[in-house]
Image (cartoon, helix red, strand yellow):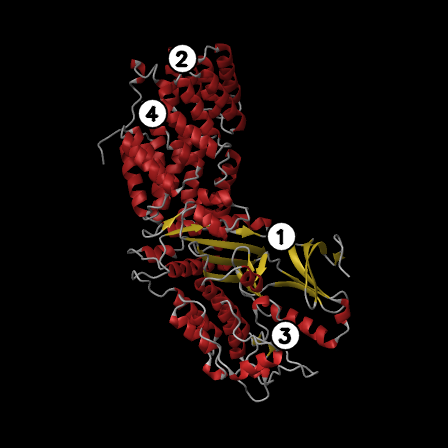
Amino acid sequence: MALAKGTRLGPYEILSFIGAGGMGDVYRAWDTRLERDVAIKVLAERLACEPRSLARFRTEAKSIAALSHPNILSIYDAELEHPPLFLVTELLEGVTLRQQIGRSAIPWRRAVQIGSEVADGLATAHDARIIHRDLKPENIFVTARGAIKILDFGLARFKPAFQGKPGSRATTVSEGGSLMGTVGYLAPEQARGETVTAATDIFSLGCVLYEMVSGHRAFNLASPASTLAAILNDDPRPVADYVADVPEELDRWIGHCLRKDEKARPQSARDLGLVLRDLLAEPTAHGRTGAEFESLAVLPFFTSASSPDAEYLADGITETLINQFAQLQHLRVIARSTVFRHKGKDADPIELGRELAVSAVLTGRIFQRGDVLVIAAELINVRDGLHLWGQQYKRPLTDIFAIEEDISREISERLRVRFAPREQSRLVKRYTESPKAYQLYLKGRFLWNKRAIESMRQALRYFEQAVEEDASYARAYAGLADCTSMLAIYGALDPRLGGKRARAAQEMALQIDPDLSEAYASRGFSLLLFDWKFREAESVLRHAVHLNSGDAPAHQWLGFALGLTGQLEEARGAMRIAQQLDPFSASINTTAVFPVYWAHLFEEAIEGFRAAVELHPGYWMAHYYMGLTYAHKGEFGQAILALRHAAEIGDSIWRYSGLGYVYAQAGRPQQARSVLKKLDELGRHQYVPLIYSAAVYAGLGETDQAVEWLRRAAEQRDWMIAWLHVDPIWDSIRSDPRLQGIRVDLGPKP
């Protein structure tokens, strides 16, 4: 009898019926304790009293529980004593291999990839002394993401030892005399009721490979008896008789798997998996290997609903891997903000890879339970959908460094990345030996990436705790510098204090690690906006991109430095590189238009800011600068609409400055003065940069007031003074002799 929606089996609530099998029904359910979707396999009532069926059900539970591998279905829980009996497993979305074979032919490369992953799963089972004994397309599942899972260990046999030690015989015949397994996929020794070994599963896998590649079953005659006779006595036709473009070596290895003598077959599923992967990497007609890759997207790692506190770990590990691979000269890596647009979306990674124009994607899932961390990662070839690598790690949280290093090594090997000098060591470089400091750092970066004032304040506290935990943690000092700088940029911190703290943190980071590119990028940022030393900033930022050519923000700030020294074409070139590295970054797509805006090319600037707004409608700064550009064109209605929207969605007081300026330019002095009043009121309770009021006075044409507020802003080292000689807002007062005392250091060209 089918279970109704809402039925409770212990802590599990039935959501919907998935399907029926020989042993019972399978349901989608909700785990109310861990708050996650699961699958529940309920043993049919009629079988609960049959000793043989009950034994098979319990065997399946124990077999899966004994194994942990990304290519084997994971079990979470079981009720094996009191009816209804059930197993709780991970919920899989997709189709069985049988269904996929029925839909369309499987290209030989994809078939070999599936076979290699099944071999990997079998190797883990065999290491645990478990033989599946019923491997067939119905018991192999292809998830919606293309991952492979081995199902149904109900006929599995635990063996005390392998290779036929005396007394280790595992029968393949039931008490009633019937064969245990599926005719057509049984090995000869199973058909004869003899001992099963690892080679038995390899024969069955050979049958599956044969069927996937050729489109025909290896042994499929008119009756079960004649099929068994063929298994015992006949060899199937070569795969090449059915498919013309199959490599001879693949045909031979399938034949090896189907040898009658079990000793003539591959004796290790792990070795078979390696052989199959080597076939995928055979040289092509052009002399290149099929496993060479030039670009990678590390997609945001998923977290379980039951591990909400692990989100910072998932994001942090994703960002760490991106940063590590971005340092490799021969590998193009998609930047963080671009891939994080897809965070939380259950999209097809192959389709995302094609959208991002990369040749491979890395996906992963993270589950944290107390101090135990489970990470499953998979590398997928975007070109043909093949799985290049997959692994699951279940280790203490303190082993997070080793897990990241293992993933980095495996990915670089699978992609066959060519290393430049020193890149190998950078790939697995540890910036701290303290897991606690690293977790604090990840929490800081997680909050920093939200780019909101309050989250950056919280991030600052985590970075401070990280350096308290490990005073030699260079990256944590770089995080401190970034936070203090950005808080000053947003007007939430006095720039004199922010610049001083940022410089101290940058110096500590570079003393500890003179090759830390992000510290150089942060230093160039400060030189540019707090010290107004544009040429020196340009030199430092060029060094940052030399150390890490994949650092999009470093290219972005280099574009700023070039633009502020009048090198507008070079600035646009640097910004284009930043956009190529991070094509969906709100900040980069907005600031990439600045060189055009500074050059007073307002028509082109409008198009650029409008494109940024369309891409990121929630990013207030894109609306802000689009509004200012409309104002410089004299289109005040459009300008006010854009700036009002920026004021509504922004979190920086800065956003009011432009609105007051445009009200004044549009002939609305009363509204402009209301903005001045608002800035004055806010300034009584918090730091408000004086340059914001100076902009409104400039719009009103009150030059004396504007110049006085600019002079005072310069004394406060307000970062926007750096734009005094380029921003069109100051066109009307820039030539005032009273401003000549405010100097920026252009210096000699580096």
Q: Is residue 597 left or right of residue 670?
A: left
Separation of disc 3 and disc 1 at Cα? 32 Å
Between disc 3 and disc 1, the foreground one is 3
SS label for mark 4: helix
Pick whichever of labels 2 and 3 is earlier in the sequence.
3
Which residue corresponds to mark 4?
Answer: 598
Which residue corresponds to mark 3?
Answer: 155
Separation of disc 3 and disc 4 at Cα? 73 Å
Picture coordinates of residue 191, whole percent (x, y): 59, 82
Separation of disc 2 and disc 3 at Cα? 87 Å
Separation of disc 2 and disc 1 at Cα? 58 Å
Q: Is residue 440 visible?
A: no
Mark 2–mark 1 contact, CB under 8 Å?
no
Q: Residue at (46%, 34%) from the top-left corner?
A: 615
Which residue corresponds to mark 2?
Answer: 705
Q: Nearer the viewer, residue 707 or 39?
A: 39
For residue 139, the mark is: none
Q: Residue furthest bottom?
A: 166
> Three-letter amino acid code at disc 3?
Leu
Pick whichever of labels 4 and 1 is earlier in the sequence.
1
Which residue corresponds to mark 1?
Answer: 306
> Three-letter amino acid code at disc 1?
Ser
Picture coordinates of residue 566, whole percent (x, y): 27, 28
Picture coordinates of residue 1, whole percent (x, y): 78, 61
Pick whichever of labels 3 and 1 is earlier in the sequence.
3
**Disc 3 packing (10 Å; few <14; some 14–19; many ≥20):** many
Pick whichever of labels 3 and 4 is earlier in the sequence.
3
SS label for mark 1: loop
Pick whichever of labels 2 and 1 is earlier in the sequence.
1
**Disc 2 packing (10 Å; few <14; some 14–19; many ≥20):** some
Q: Residue furthest front?
A: 222
